[in-house]
Image: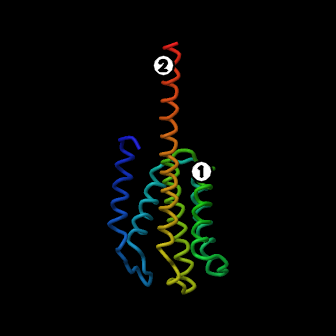
Amino acid sequence: MRKNRNRLKYMVLLYLCLILLPIKLIIGDLPVNGLFLFLLMYAVMMVILTKFPVKRYLLVLFISYLYAVYFIWRITSPVLDENTFIMIAIISGFLLIHLFTKNKDEQITIIIAGCSFGQLFYLIICNSYHLQYTVNYETYFTIIFAILFIIAIQSCWEYIMIKIESFIKSLEYKKRWNT
């Protein structure tokens, strides 16, 4: 990313994620991870402060609903092994985000908000059926950070392609100038 306010915001967000990862809290009867609470508060603030069109808010709700349903399906019908389950979630989450939004900041906000709200729904549903110990925060973190990592790789790839194209254009210009 270029040096700007968003890069500083994401850098501080990542540092806070590293600091809050090992913290575990008990809220009521629920064991909750400190990083999950931080990402949930971040998602709420960003959804409130960012002025999205209605389609983006519906996309956040859709992702959160899909996330909760996907994990409930994992409990009720454990067909897939853990790695396949995570890979399908990562690929489908990235494709869903990539199809509906092109702006990187919107993609990051929507994926964090959708996964965080989905994890909250999943936690509430599991607690209501006394399955709160089936909630796995490591899978949540793996999915969300893998999707963010793929978005970062895509952004770097686009940057490299732009640089290569400008280098080729400058070579073509010099070649025309010399002939």
Q: Which mark is residue 114?
A: none
Circle nearer the N terminus (1, 2)? 1
Q: Where is residue 120 in the image (x, y as percent from the top left)?
A: 51, 71
Seen as rendered, the residue at the extreme bottom is 130
Q: Is mark 1 on a helix, strand or loop?
A: helix
Q: Residue 174 carries which label?
A: 2
Q: Is residue 172 above or below residue 5?
A: above
What amino acid is at disc 2?
A: Lys
In front here: 115 or 154? Answer: 154
Left or right? Give the position of 23 relative to 150: left
The total number of labels drawn is 2
Q: Report which residue position mark 1 lands on.
A: 98
Mark 2: give few (<14), some (14-19) or many (20+) Cα within 10 Å: few
Left or right? Give the position of 26 relative to 104: left
Task: Please report the residue visible at 49 percent of the width from the left and 56 percent of the height from the top.
Answer: 148
Task: Please report the residue visible at 65 percent of the width from the left and 81 percent of the height from the top.
Answer: 76
Q: Is mark 2 on a helix, strand or loop?
A: helix
What amino acid is at disc 1?
A: His
